[in-house]
Image (cartoon, rainbow, N blue to C red):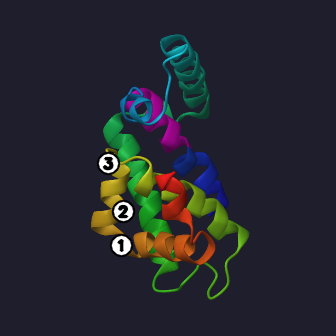
Amino acid sequence: MLIMNDEHLFWALPLWRFVIDNGKEMCTLMDFSVMGPFVFHFIKRNYQQALWAQGLSRHSRDEIQEIIRKDLEAISRYLGQKPYLMGDTVTEVDCALFGVLAQFLWALSCSPFRNIIQKDFQNLERYCERIKNTFFSDWDDLLEK
């Protein structure tokens, strides 16, 4: 599960942010006004190189979406109706997975990954809500600041 998270799911985040979306959504949330274009271009170029070396960006968009869909399906099936991946207790794997899935759900509002989770794998959305409400009860308050 951790390998899937680290080798596929995680890399879908910068792939969406810097390559597919070209930073549009991210730039509306962050202030790049001081050295904006230069800094963003530098970050984007570094991620493009890393994504090519990692291998995910060597696939077509449809292939990438299918890879991520299959990963999400595997996690969804494994989770089933359990509160956490290993049962009733949160583990390191839950924490790592939450870090990525939470970004799919709440930080990439325009991405297809969010739509896939919300449409086809609602148990993953409930799983993330459960972790958020249990361990980050001040989440919404902090986002308003």
Q: Where is residue 62, by image quadrant?
A: top left
Residue occupying image coordinates x 37% and y 31%? 20
Where's residue 68, x and y in %?
Answer: 43, 52
CA distance separating discs 1 and 2: 6 Å
Residue occupying image coordinates x 59% and y 62%? 97
CA distance separating discs 1 and 3: 15 Å
User: Which one is nearer the viewer's eye here, 137 or 126?
Assistant: 137
Q: What residue type is labelled 1?
A: Gln
Q: What residue type is labelled 3?
A: Pro
- The mark nearer the N terminus, 1 or 3, is 3
Question: With 69 as the anchor, is 11 left or right in this view?
Answer: right
| Residue at the far front in the pictured view | 145
Q: Are marks 3 and 2 in contact (CB under 8 Å)?
A: no
Residue that carries the numbered disc 3 in the rendered image:
112
Residue 16 located within the stretch drawn in magenta: yes
Where's residue 66, x and y in %?
Answer: 36, 50
CA distance separating discs 3 and 2: 9 Å
Q: What element carries label 2?
A: helix
Compared with 89, 53 (above or below) is: above
Compared with 33, 143 (above or below) is: below
Residue that carries the numbered disc 2 in the rendered image:
117
Where residue 122 is drawn, which disc sits there?
A: 1
- Span colored in magenta: 11-20
Residue occupying image coordinates x 48% and y 18%? 33
